[in-house]
Image (spheres, rainbow, N blue to C red):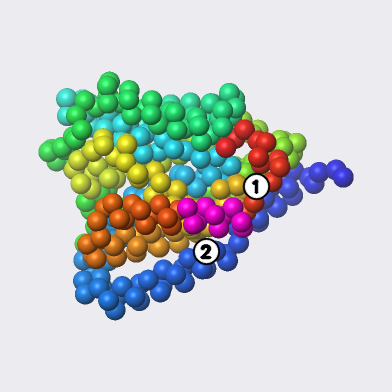
Amino acid sequence: MAPPPREEYLMQQVLKGGSLNQEQMVLIISAILFILFSITLDSFLQISNLLSLLQNVSILGILAIGMSVVIIGRGIDLTMVAVMVYSVGWSFSMYLDGMPILPALALGLLLALAIGAFNGFLVSYVEIPAIFATLAMATVISGLGRFALVESDTLFITVDLGLLGTLGSGRLAGVVPMPVILFLVLASIAYVALRFTRYGAFVYAIGDNYTAARNNGVANRPMTLLMYTVSAAIAFFAGLIMTTTVSTVNTKLANSTMIYDIILVVVIGGIGLSGGKGSIRNVLSGTILIGLLLNGMTIMNISYSVQSILKAVILLAAIIVDSMLNPRDEQTSQQGDI
């Protein structure tokens, strides 16, 4: 049978982009948790706590947007946290050494884009499985970053950043933290890009069936390279917001479990690891659920170690459910993109 016309084929991939069933289930669980925490935890319903919850989880949500783009395109990016830490850390290290802030940020962004493009090159042109390519690159970035870019574990931003500082510390109407607004703005842009543009259709097509996408004229390799570059750019943006929020760059985050929290948000929200399914709405629902869980566990004074165990169990359960709902077909298992 002849393949469908290119435009019709791409539209079919976008319309496939994820069922609402898991998204609705996650939102129901989030509502139940919200009610339960409201009843059982005294300080949970305080406005200050709810705003803090939203602000704290917004960085995770921004990173999850970048990860979701790659995963929908049948990849994975384990370098996001390392890119975030060392590209932004290098920028502020140069700034503290006397370089003007804009050139310093431009160089940091170029570094992030270069790393993202190299990740995409390894996956699409060298055809190294994404999980191995990005895992190795994350180690390389952490090692070289600590050796050549940011010498200390912590950079303290003691100078006034002016308008730039409002990215993290500003509040809309004096109430809503700016990181939350920026997360929603980026989510809106990503949603439109994935669902209503040709390039978004390419991402879904590659994730759904790599060979069929190529046969219908999609430039698979350049698009894969672009996906990883976008992921790195979003990581830099998230790092900039985090730095201006806490006035600190903590390079130890590069070796933390934060990357698994990002994957947890994406998978539990309903974006299938097999590719070609899900949308930014899934990221929003996953971010809400994980934010509620983390906030509730913090208020209950559950230790960090126990929280890590619980998150690992939830992630494992989410991956098992995903493997049952979105089984990897023969073409997927043979494809070297993940």
The outermost residue toward the bottom is 39
Q: Amino acid at mark 1?
A: Arg
* Circle nearer the N terminus (1, 2): 2
CB of mark 1 within 8 Å of CB of mark 2?
no
The Cα atoms of the two marked residues, 1 and 2, are separated by 20 Å
Dot 2 lies on which element? helix
Left or right placement of residue 246 versus residue 261 in this view: left
The outermost residue toward the left is 158
Residue at image point 20% right, 40% down: 248
Look at the image and tell me in which quarter the N terminus lies.
Answer: top right
Mark 1 surroundings: few (<14), some (14-19) or many (≥20) residues within 10 A: some
Residue 191 image point, x, y percent: 51, 53
Residue 104 image point, x, y percent: 27, 28
In this view, the residue in front, 192 or 143, is 143
In this view, the residue in front, 240 or 118, is 118
Residue 10 image point, x, y percent: 69, 47
Q: Which residue is disc 2 drawn over?
A: 23
- Work out whether 67 lies above or below 285: above
Q: State the extent of the magenta-drawn residues as a range.
A: 316-325
Q: Is the stretch drawn in magenta largely helix, strand or loop?
A: helix
Dot 1 lies on which element? loop
Q: Amino acid at mark 2?
A: Glu
Q: Which residue is disc 1 drawn over?
A: 328
Q: Is residue 238 magenta?
A: no
Q: Is residue 29 visible?
A: yes
